[in-house]
Amino acid sequence: MTTWMKNVRQVEPYVPGEQPRIDNIIKLNTNENPYPPSPKVVNLSMDLNKLRVYPDSSVGPLVSAIAEYHGISEDNVFVGVGSDDVIAMSFMTFFNSDKPIIFPDITYSFYDVWANLFRIPFETKPLNDKFEIVPEDYNCENGGIIFPNPNAPTCVYLPLESVRKILDNNRDVVVIVDEAYVDYAGESALSLINEYDNLLVVRTFSKSRSMAGLRIGYAMGNSALISALNNVKFSFNSYTMNYTQILLGVESIRDDEYFKSMIKKVVDTREWFCKELTRLGFSYPESSTNFVFATHKSVPAKELFEAAKKENIYVRYFDKPRIDNYLRITIGTDEEMKKVVEFFEKYC
């Protein structure tokens, strides 16, 4: 090893879902929305001459639109380049104790990557046999807590009263609720931010708003939390959001009717698909997301994953303890899901 290599930080990176570069595939491995963004987004005319100047570093128009949509103050909103950027910034900002942060053992696999990258000690708490978070497990000394709700990849939603239990027992640390999929689920923890000044709720435009390619995420919480996030952001990169992100993000927020109609389409397809999975011998936790986490009674998940791939059907397989016999299947269009069912019928 050369001398300079000794000073290079060694980390094990996050591995995203495969992005195949071929045509005519059914891509159900990265939880993207199968439908296009709002027509207001698609048809917006922009003055591209403005690309020569720096964008609004405060992300003012988008912050304002998000605040108005959720009925909160602008100083309760922080915007970043996708929720991954927002959460990474939150790790740097809030998790600086010598005590370990806590998150579930089966969860979004970026959490331990960020913890290792920023040299933050961490511990994981096991989900129960139903893949549920157990609030009592978080009643311990820690340096902060983060969990998705609904959880990923298990698709299980934690009721608001259980989220409250975690908050009640952890008032001295920041608790981050990652709500990437909450639009497909139940009540958001956003209703609690005025009650708990240590609660940060994170959302994304990537899933329900069909804008994964634009990279917009945001956090909502007490103004002191948001101010701290902005201080770190401006110490890191003042211009994280570009001109097009800001304008198109505003248009997406403004078209609430389209947004809700697309959620309903995905949920309706999900319910039909789940019934078909049951008929074909699969079992799964009740899904509160735009994907299903399923296992078959006799055919191993890895075998199904590889066979589906040969048919240009891409789903997600995690070769990890406790979940290595499950497939995470994103909900696509009705036509795509019918083809998936046809494949399962032939193979299983």
Image: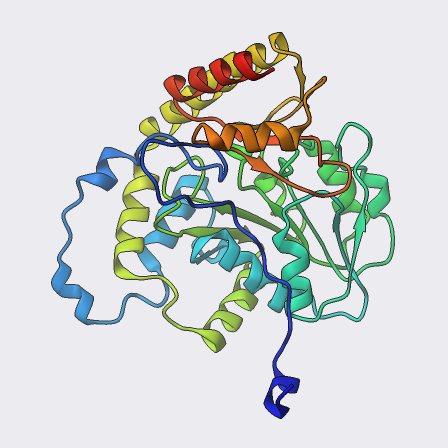
Pinpoint residue 84: horizontal percent, then vertical percent. Answer: 52, 55
Front-most of residues 64 and 298 = 298
Q: Name the residue located 87 percent from the left edge and 53 percent from the top edge.
A: 140
Residue 41 position by quadrant: top left
- Residue 61 visible somewhere in the drawing: yes
Q: Name the residue located 51 percent from the left edge and 12 percent from the top edge.
A: 272
320 to 310, vertically: above or below: below
66 to 187, vertically: above or below: below
Looking at the figure, which quarter contains the C terminus?
Answer: top right
As drawn, which residue projects farthest toward the bottom?
3
Residue 129 position by quadrant: top right
- Residue 194 visible somewhere in the drawing: no
Q: Name the residue located 39 percent from the left edge and 52 percent from the top edge.
A: 215
Pinpoint residue 254: horizontal percent, then vertical percent. Answer: 30, 38
Q: Name the residue located 27 percent from the left edge and 48 percent from the top edge.
A: 248
- What kind of colouring is applied to the model shown? rainbow
As drawn, which residue projects farthest toward the top?
279
Front-most of residues 252 and 103 = 103
- Image check: 80 left or right of 255? right
Looking at the figure, which quarter contains the N terminus?
Answer: bottom right
Pinpoint residue 96: horizontal percent, then vertical percent. Answer: 71, 70
Pinpoint residue 61: horizontal percent, then vertical percent. Answer: 31, 54
- Image check: 262 left or right of 184? left
- Image check: 130 left or right of 2? right
Front-most of residues 3 and 282 = 3
